[in-house]
Image (cartoon, rainbow, N blue to C red):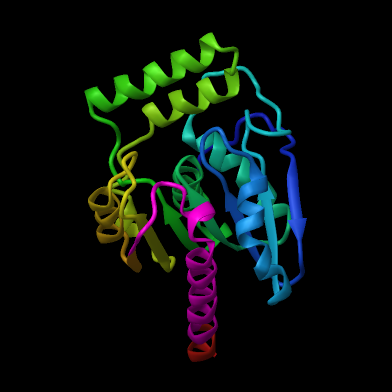
Amino acid sequence: MPSLPPAIDLNVRSRGDGELVVGLHDLLADGGGMMRALRPLTTKGYRVVVPDLRGHGGSPSPDGPWSIDDFASDVARIVASRGGPAIVVGQGLGAAAALALALGHPGLVSGLVLSGVGPRGEDAEGHERWMKVSRAFEERGQAGAAHAAEAMANRPDWRGALPQLEVPSVVIAGQHDRATPPDVQRELAVWLRNAGFQSVPTGHDVAAERPGILLAAVKHLATAADRAEAVAA
C-alpha cells in the first residue's frame, strides 16, 4: 500500500443510508454535479458520498506537485472513515483517482464505474498537451487545476497492474468523447479482469448527459456483489 501524503480535509457531500457509493468528479468540476447525478440512489438504499477533490470546489489546495496517488489517498481516508468498502464512480480525473484507489487500497473498493479515462500513461505528445493545460491554469491563478492537470500528465501506465484487480467494474464511454475516445476506454475494460463495457451516445461528461447510465451500472454492481456473497455463504 502506498504511503499517505499529509492529510487534508476535503469538502464532502453525503446523502442517504445504506450501501456506500462514492462519486469522484472531473477536472474543473466539483462534487455538486456528481451528487446530482447519483442522488436518485439515496432513496434506493444507498449512501452517496461525493467529495470535492483537492484543489476543487470547497476543498484545500496544498502546494504541488501532486500525483494521482495523492487524490486516491485523500479518497481512501473518506471511504475508510465511513466504513467502506464502496462502489466508486469516477469520471475523467475522478476515474483516474478511482483506479489508483482500487490498486493502492483494494480493500476499500467493492466496485468501479469508470468513464473518461484509459489504461495507459501519456506519450510525449499527450504529456506536453496536459502540461500546456497546466501552465494555462497556472497563468490564470488556478493553482489547484494546474496541479491536477500536471498529475494527469504524469499518471502511470496501469496496464501491467490492472489484471490483478478482481473488483467488478463497468467502463462507460461516450461515443463522442474527444478527450478520451471510446477505443481508449474499451482498452481499459480489456485490461480489467472483471469489467463490462458500454458505449453511449454522449460526449465526455456522461454524468451530466446520461446520469441514468451511471445509476444502472451502480445497481448492477451491487446486485452482482449480493449474488457473489450469497453463493459464498
Residue at figure coordinates x 65%, y 22% from the top left: 62
Q: Does the magenta run of residues contain 191?
A: no
| Quarter of image, res 188 | bottom left
Residue at figure coordinates x 56%, y 37% from the top left: 71
Residue at figure coordinates x 53%, y 84% from the top left: 229
Q: Is residue 203 above or below residue 113?
A: above
x, y percentage for residue 78?
A: 69, 49
Residue at figure coordinates x 28%, y 27% from the top left: 126
Question: Which of these two is toward me, 13 or 166?
Answer: 13
- Magenta-tinted stretch: 199-228
In the drawing, does residue 40 fall left or right of residue 66?
right
x, y percentage for residue 146?
A: 51, 20
x, y percentage for residue 191?
A: 27, 57
In the drawing, does residue 71 fall left or right of residue 9?
left
Question: Which of these two is toward me, 61 or 138?
Answer: 138
x, y percentage for residue 155?
A: 38, 33
Quarter in which the C terminus is drawn: bottom right
Q: Does the magenta run of residues contain 225?
A: yes
Question: Which of these two is toward me, 122 or 156?
Answer: 122
In the drawing, does residue 35 fall left or right of residue 220?
right
Q: In the displayed image of the protein, which residue is found farthest to the top?
A: 139
Q: Is residue 230 above or below residue 1?
A: below
